[in-house]
Image: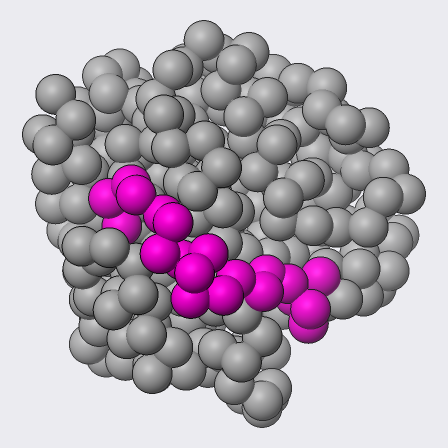
């Protein structure tokens, strides 16, 4: 797969198109309709996308995981993609509940989770709240307390990603004219949440890999180190030559790392 370090392909075309879904549908959860789709067969792997994105951002990852023998489950976070939301403020706890609602509807007892940015936070909260449902969490490019975030500095790469998110939102959302309000609501959540203490992190008992791009625009590398040191038996991976957008920038690199993680998560679980 070609690299897209500057996200020029992504802004023009999006990620690779998703393959045809095995199953797809909606689940009602706490005032929202949550869109989901599944691909392939085998141990279940849930991919949770980042804030302002949608499940189609995983277009480079789904075929690789299906080919490796896994059942991939994609979910549009509430208010993102084809999922709806009500007037409740966004929260990662609420989005974790949405994920459990999808797993329950699909009768999936336990899955490995690959979380990117906001999706990583949602997955780790699930790992603490419902460890019996979580074979492991690959936590890529997020913070677990506000101090882990860098001050925002715009860049051309971030601008391209944001433009793609706007176009996708307008194409997929049931409220296509409300992108700016959507951004404001998600940004408010990101500003104040999550706010896990070291004690909260120490209560996490599932397998965790903390990963961060060498040039992440939003998250301090020192925070990733702290998370890996504070969560019991967590592994730290710094991905070279990529930023917050590694799954799009260097899909082959990212896919190799997540396939290794998923394999070891299920080995440990079997």
Image color mode: one colour
Give coordinates of residue 241: x percent, y percent: 23, 79
- Establish if 250 lies above or below 79: below
Give coordinates of residue 224: x percent, y percent: 33, 72
Q: Quadrant of the C terminus?
A: top left
- Establish if 41 lies above or below 252: above
Depth check, front residue: 228 or 19: 228
Q: Is residue 236 visible?
A: yes
Provide the residue span drawn in magenta: 189-209
Residue 214, quarter of the rendered image: bottom left
Q: Is residue 16 visible?
A: no
Depth check, front residue: 155 or 51: 51
Residue 53 forms part of the magenta stretch: no
Residue extending farthest front: 199
- Establish if 93 lies above or below 118: above
User: Which residue is at a point 25% across and 69% down the rendered structure image?
Assistant: 229
Residue 197 forms part of the magenta stretch: yes
Give coordinates of residue 14: x percent, y percent: 50, 54
User: Which residue is at a point 24% across and 55% down the rendered structure image?
Assistant: 232
Give coordinates of residue 144: x percent, y percent: 49, 64
User: Which residue is at a point 30% across and 65% down the rendered structure image?
Assistant: 230
Residue 259, quarter of the rendered image: top left
User: Which residue is at a point 41% across and 82% down the rendered structure image?
Assistant: 220
Q: Quadrant of the N terminus?
A: bottom left
Q: As drawn, is 67 to the left or to the right of 170?
A: left
């Amino acid at each position: 797969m070609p690299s897209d370090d500057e996200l020029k392909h992504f802004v023009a075309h999006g990620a690779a198109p998703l393959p045809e879904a095995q199953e797809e549908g909606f689940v009602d959860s706490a005032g929202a309709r949550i869109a989901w789709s599944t691909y392939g067969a085998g141990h279940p792997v849930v991919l949770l996308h980042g804030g302002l994105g949608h499940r189609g951002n995983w277009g480079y990852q789904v075929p690789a995981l299906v080919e490796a023998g896994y059942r991939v489950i994609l979910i549009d976070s509430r208010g993102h993609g084809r999922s709806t939301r009500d007037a409740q403020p966004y929260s990662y706890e609420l989005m974790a509940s949405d994920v459990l609602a999808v797993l329950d509807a699909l009768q999936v007892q336990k899955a490995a989770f690959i979380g990117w940015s906001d999706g990583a936070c949602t997955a780790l909260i699930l790992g603490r709240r419902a460890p019996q449902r979580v074979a492991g969490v690959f936590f890529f490019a997020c913070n677990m307390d506000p101090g882990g975030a860098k001050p925002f500095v715009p860049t051309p790469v971030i601008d391209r990603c944001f433009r793609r998110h706007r176009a996708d939102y307008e194409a997929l959302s049931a409220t296509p004219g409300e992108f700016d309000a959507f951004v404001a609501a998600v940004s408010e959540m990101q500003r104040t949440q999550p706010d896990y203490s070291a004690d909260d992190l120490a209560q996490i008992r599932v397998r965790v890999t903390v990963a961060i791009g060498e040039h992440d625009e939003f998250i301090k590398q020192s925070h990733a180190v702290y998370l890996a040191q504070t969560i019991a038996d967590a592994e730290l991976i710094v991905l070279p030559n990529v930023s917050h957008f590694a799954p799009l920038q260097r899909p082959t690199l990212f896919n190799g790392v997540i396939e290794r993680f998923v394999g070891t998560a299920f080995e440990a679980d079997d």
